[in-house]
Amino acid sequence: MKKFRMIITITLLLSMALSACQAAIVDPEPEKDIYPVEDNTVQEDPQKDPEQTYPVAETEDTDGAFGNLAYISDPKASAEELQKLAHASNQFALDLYQQLVDKEGNLIYSPFSVYQALLMTYAGAEGETAQEMMDVLGVTDDNAIHNVMNALNLTLQSKPAYVTKDMQPLIFNIANALWAQKDFHFEQAFLDKLSANYSAGLRLVDFNNPDEARQLINHWVELQTNEKIKDLIPAGLLNEMTRLVLSNAVYFKGAWSNRFDSARNTTEEFTSLDGAKNKVEMMNNSFTGAGFVENDYSVVSLPYEGGNFAMMALLPEDFVAFQKTLDADLLNEIFGKLSQNNAMIHLTMPKFSTESSFDLGETLAAMGMPNAFDYDAADFSGMTGAKDLYISDVVHQAFIDVNEDGTEAAAATMVGMAATSMPGEAITFRFDRPFIYLIYNTETDTVLFMGHVVAP
């Protein structure tokens, strides 16, 4: 059979800029039954490779750890705490979706990557800046939230509930790093908090040579995302005023529990959001799974092998109207109904590829945290001991390719985040008009990737 691959790539960049007097704002100016698996092993540090041409960051040790506190590999958090943080992350995901729904064309982004990057940034926020970020992130003023995020990260990266020898290995990895201006002071408590809870290694760079720093960070992102994100930071985005970049990379790869057979693919009409009808390649499958039909929408869950991740696909009767009503309460209701509705699913959906790119600075400020982006009002004194940092840039990129065999996903964020009952009715789902999709963890319902298709 043909080789198939599904790629989701999502990228966000927030960089922190500093001025001794007044900081300058920088304007922000893809024949086997199982699809091939690239080697996802994180490569050695580039400074160990004499052939590499990227600039080398100074690190405090070869493991990238730093601070007085080692990474906590067994954080203690209750199921209730994990669920509360997952709900807060999902609330942020849907709040951000409401800010992006009016963008033209298809959409893909990683709310979880954005959320975690902002939570790392919040670790150094104080005063009104911290309060605004807490409100947007849905957290309380409690340092324990970073411990809970650590526990959630480990839960998401835990091995699938069941594994067989012929199963496609499911991969979900998270990596964090700090890129700091050398010879610039950062509070030890801030560094300890990120090293202990996010395993965020410290790299010392010289932003007086911004292009070298840009190449180095881009190379790190490329390695952590299995080469799915290249040249993340465009030339000119970083400058001599940059003092800190916090980075988060997320990589996901999983095969459908119920793979589509390409021999069953058909060419059919898809009615786009603008009413245009185009012929597209449709995948077809039948399986026992979770799905149900309401008056104004239909929903089906497509699990990945291992059982701990799935893709949810939502098909609204009125796409535009439904977008505006999709919130955390409705999403929680859908999750609940999916767990109770088992049926014989007959599914038809298109293969699709999508890329998205955003400047999220104004978006996040409009969501309720303007002070973080205001060099006069920002208070990140928890990072440096002084009010001398602010968030200067937020860039987000995403890519997804959906096909018969599974999903590969990558996200990079820089801040300068089986039914046991017999099936009931048979339900036919035809995704031949605009629909919404998301990839989530089935244990916590944490949404990792989200988007919509209006014209495959």
Image (cartoon, grey):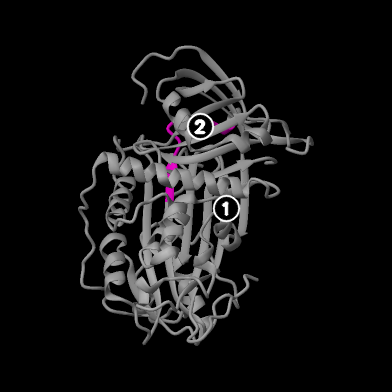
Asked whether the residues under the numbered discs 2 and 1 touch, taking CB atoms below 8 Å apart as contact, a structural biologist would say no
Residue 115 is situated, as x and y percent measured from the top left of the image, at: 44, 54
Q: Position of residue 41 (x, y in %)?
A: 36, 59
Q: Quadrant of residue 188?
A: bottom left
Of the pair 276 and 72, the residue shown nearer to us: 72
Q: Quadrant of the N terminus?
A: top right
| Residue 288 relative to residue 275: left or right | left
Check residue 312 for magenta coloring: no
Q: Residue 45's mark?
A: none
Q: Residue at x 54, y 33 (%)?
A: 313
User: Identity of the amino acid at label 2?
Assistant: Leu
Q: Residue at x 47, y 54 (%)?
A: 410
| Magenta-tinted stretch | 252-262
Q: Is residue 258 visible?
A: no
Instruction: Give the residue number, with chain letter if any, for mark 2.
Output: 330
Q: Indicate left or right for 335 with 321 as reference.
A: left
Q: Quadrant of the rendered structure where residue 60 is?
A: bottom left
Q: Residues within 10 Å of mark 1 (few under 14, many from 20)?
A: many
Which secondary structure lies at badge 2?
A: helix
Secondary structure state at the residue bearing disc 1: strand
Q: Percent x, y for residue 234?
A: 59, 72
Q: Which residue is mark 1?
A: 399
Position in image of residue 232 (x %, y %): 54, 67
Rendered position, 288 above or below 38: above
